[in-house]
C-alpha cells in the first residue's frame, strides 16, 4: 500500500514546489504523509493541520484569482464588443463616405462638362458679339448718313415759302413822253 501511495505523494510534492508553497512545510509533510494515518504522532498532526491551513488559504487565493479573472474576462468581452461595434460603425461611415466621394466625383465630372459647354457657348457668344459690333458700327454709319440727309431735308423744309419769281425788267422801259 505504501508503494501505491508514493506516486500521488510525489505528484503532490511537485505541485507544492511548482506553486512555490512553503518548502520546509512540504519537506515535513512528505515524511508525515508517507506514514499511515494510524502511525502519525502529535508533530505529524501539527504538520497536517498547517498543510490544511496553507492549502485552504492557497485555494481561497486561487478562487479569488479565478473570480477576478471572470470579472476581467467579462470586462474584456465588453471591450471587445464595444470595439466591434465601433469598428462596424466606422466601416459603415467609411462606406457612406465612399458613396459621398463617388457622388462628388460624378458631380465634378458633370460640372466640368457643363463648364466646357459654357466655355464653348461663351466663345460663340464672343464671336456673335463681334459680328453684332460690326453690324452696329455699320448701322451707326448708316444712321449718320441718314441724319445728314434728314438735316438737309429739314433745311429744305424751312424754305417752303417760295419767293415769287422776280419778273424780269422789261428791256425797253416805256418812253416818257414819246
Image (tube, grey):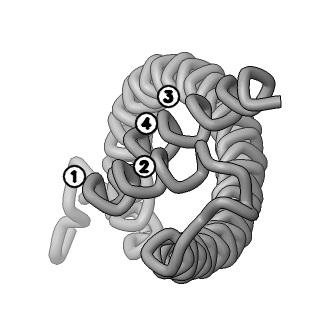
- Specify the quadrant that holds the C terminus: bottom left
Residue 130: image location, x then y, percent: 39, 23
Q: Above or below — where is 35 with respect to 63?
A: above
CA distance separating discs 1 and 3: 85 Å
**Mark-to-mark CA distance, 2 and 1:** 173 Å
Q: Secondary structure at mark 3?
A: helix
Residue on which disc 1 sits: 172
Give the residue drawn at x 55%, y 19%. 116
Residue at x 50% of width, y 28% of height: 122
**Where, quadrant-wise, is the N terminus in this rendering?**
top right
Q: CA distance from mark 4 to mark 1?
A: 65 Å
Q: Residue at x 45, y 30 (%)?
A: 129
Label 1: how many Cα within 10 Å (few below 14, some 14–19, many 20+): few
Which tag, 4 or 3, sits closer to the chain's start?
3
Q: Is residue 86 above or below residue 115?
A: below
Q: Which mark is residue 107?
A: none
Q: Residue furthest left?
A: 176
Q: Please count the marks in the image.
A: 4
Q: Nearer the viewer, residue 63 or 168?
A: 63
Residue 26 in the image, given as x and y percentages of width and height = 40, 53
Pointer 4 or 2: first along the chain: 2
Marked residue nearer the N-terminal end (1 or 3): 3
| Helix, strand or loop at mark 2 | loop
Q: What residue is disc 4 on? A: 136
| Label 4 with label 1: CB-CB less than 8 Å | no
Observer-side mark, 4 or 1, equals 4
Task: Quote the CA–CA distance across marks 4 and 3.
Answer: 20 Å
Which residue is labeled 2 in the image? 19
Indicate which disc residue 122 carries. 3
Amino acid at each position: 500500500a505504501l508503494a501505491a501511495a508514493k506516486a500521488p505523494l510525489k505528484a503532490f510534492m511537485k505541485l507544492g514546489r511548482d506553486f512555490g508553497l512553503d518548502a520546509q512545510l512540504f519537506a515535513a509533510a512528505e515524511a508525515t504523509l508517507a506514514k499511515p494515518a494510524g502511525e502519525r504522532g502529535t508533530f505529524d498532526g501539527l504538520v497536517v493541520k498547517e498543510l490544511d491551513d496553507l492549502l485552504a488559504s492557497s485555494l481561497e487565493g486561487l478562487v479569488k484569482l479565478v473570480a477576478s479573472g471572470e470579472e476581467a474576462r467579462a470586462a474584456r468581452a465588453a471591450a471587445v464588443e464595444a470595439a466591434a461595434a465601433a469598428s462596424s460603425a466606422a466601416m459603415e461611415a467609411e462606406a457612406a463616405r465612399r458613396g459621398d466621394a463617388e457622388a462628388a466625383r460624378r458631380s465634378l465630372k458633370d460640372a466640368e462638362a457643363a463648364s466646357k459647354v459654357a466655355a464653348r457657348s461663351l466663345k460663340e457668344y464672343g464671336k456673335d458679339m463681334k459680328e453684332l459690333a460690326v453690324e452696329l458700327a455699320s448701322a451707326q454709319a448708316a444712321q449718320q448718313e441718314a441724319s445728314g440727309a434728314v438735316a438737309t431735308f429739314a433745311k429744305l423744309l424751312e424754305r417752303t415759302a417760295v419767293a415769287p419769281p422776280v419778273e424780269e425788267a422789261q428791256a425797253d422801259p416805256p418812253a416818257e413822253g414819246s
